[in-house]
Image (spheres, rainbow, N blue to C red):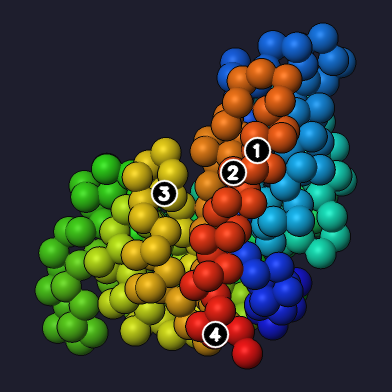
């Protein structure tokens, strides 16, 4: 999916909502445990209930790998239930030396056929390059939403050549030379809305994947005000707030209501750029 196709879908739906399929078998409604594949059944119903309100789904690989081979089968079957016009993200946070990254890229792009994969930049350009394929996306971790982001991402480096003072700023500056806005997104956490405006000024045309809305306390209005560009430029993720809106048999209906509410909030802000 191209950047313009993604933007067109955002305009059409009035939504930049990404739903994280962080499906924890310990948290899904107990009545689903009678199914042969409870995780798949849960995901199938969530997708059917919410797909009209979102533009992306983001399965977190850890929740499927924890189930061993059966969990990966659930993941693969889940992907087949996602409508073809919806952007798919493998939230895998991979990043290793080149030949290993090439294998990861083959897994997520050739086998599972995701549109995008989240990648850690810590090992540098050669660990990211194998994921940079035409028609596919790298979503690079720049400024994350967890409290531990302060440990390294805000380290002072005082670069004499780029004038970028924090490590996350240097990651942003360096990586923008690796690919353009048609194949490279950045993770920019909703819990740092005061920094989103600065990141947007440095990367005016790139899309941002924004985690941290809902359970982590991020403010959607602040994020959209600080981070939008002419194409919206944001995929705002919500996981637990939607998935576990109810623990009862009405879980899919409650997920739909929550997704619609988030979409409606987004739509009001998107009107400023939709002509």
Task: Give residue 20's quadrant in the image.
Answer: top right
Q: Is residue 63 left or right of residue 83?
A: left
Image location of residue 98, percent across then percent down: 57, 59
Image location of residue 166, percent across then percent down: 20, 67
Disc 2 and disc 1: Cα gap in Å? 5 Å
Instruction: Kindly indicate whether the residue at mark 1 contacts the one at mark 4 (C-beta within 8 angstroms).
Output: no
Mark 2 sits on what residue?
A: 258
How many other residues sit within 10 Å of disc 2, few (<14), some (14-19) or many (≥20)? Answer: many
Mark 4 sits on what residue?
A: 273
Task: Give residue 49's quadrant in the image.
Answer: top right
Instruction: Kindly indicate whether the residue at mark 1 contacts the one at mark 2 (C-beta within 8 angstroms).
Output: yes
Image location of residue 51, percent across then percent down: 76, 52
Q: Secondary structure at mark 1?
A: helix
Mark 3 sits on what residue?
A: 212
Q: Residue at x 34, y 84 (%)?
A: 201
Q: Nearer the viewer, mark 2 or mark 3?
A: 2
> Does label 1 or label 3 sit earlier along the sequence?
3
Q: Residue at x 23, y 84 (%)?
A: 162
Q: Identify the mark at residue 119; answer none if there is no mark.
A: none
Disc 4 and disc 1: Cα gap in Å? 27 Å
Quadrant, the N terminus? bottom right
Q: Identify the mark at residue 255; answer none if there is no mark.
A: 1
Instruction: Kindly indicate whether the residue at mark 3 contacts the one at mark 1 (C-beta within 8 angstroms).
Output: no
Q: Is residue 111 left or right of residue 271?
A: right
Of residues 241 and 183, which is closer to you in this image?
A: 241
How many other residues sit within 10 Å of disc 4, few (<14), some (14-19) or many (≥20)? Answer: few
Q: Nearer the viewer, mark 4 or mark 3?
A: 4
Q: Secondary structure at mark 2?
A: helix
């Amino acid at each position: 999916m191209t950047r313009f196709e993604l933007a067109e879908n955002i305009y059409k739906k009035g939504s930049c909502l990404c739903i994280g399929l962080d499906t924890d078998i310990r948290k899904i409604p107990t009545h689903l445990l009678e199914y042969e594949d409870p995780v798949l059944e849960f995901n199938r119903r969530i997708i059917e209930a919410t797909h009209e309100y979102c533009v992306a789904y983001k399965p977190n690989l850890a929740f499927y790998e924890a189930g061993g081979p059966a969990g990966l089968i659930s993941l693969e079957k889940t992907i087949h239930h996602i409508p073809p016009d919806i952007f798919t993200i493998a939230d895998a946070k991979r990043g290793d030396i080149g030949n290993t990254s090439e294998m990861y890229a083959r897994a997520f792009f050739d086998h599972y056929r995701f549109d995008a994969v989240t990648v850690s930049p810590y090992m540098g350009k050669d660990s990211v390059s194998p994921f940079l394929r035409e028609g596919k996306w790298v979503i690079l971790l720049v400024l994350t939403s967890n409290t531990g982001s302060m440990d390294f991402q805000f380290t002072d480096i005082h670069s004499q050549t780029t004038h970028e003072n924090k490590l996350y700023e240097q990651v942003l500056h360096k990586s923008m030379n690796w690919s353009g806005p048609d194949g490279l997104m950045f993770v920019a956490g909703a819990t740092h809305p005061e920094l989103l405006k600065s990141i947007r000024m440095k990367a005016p045309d790139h899309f941002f994947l924004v985690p941290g809305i809902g359970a982590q306390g991020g403010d959607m209005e602040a994020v959209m005000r600080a981070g939008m560009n002419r194409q919206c430029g944001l995929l705002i993720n919500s996981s637990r707030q939607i998935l576990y809106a109810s623990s009862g048999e009405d879980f899919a209906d409650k997920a739909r209501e929550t997704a619609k509410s988030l979409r409606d909030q987004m739509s009001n802000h998107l009107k400023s750029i939709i002509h």
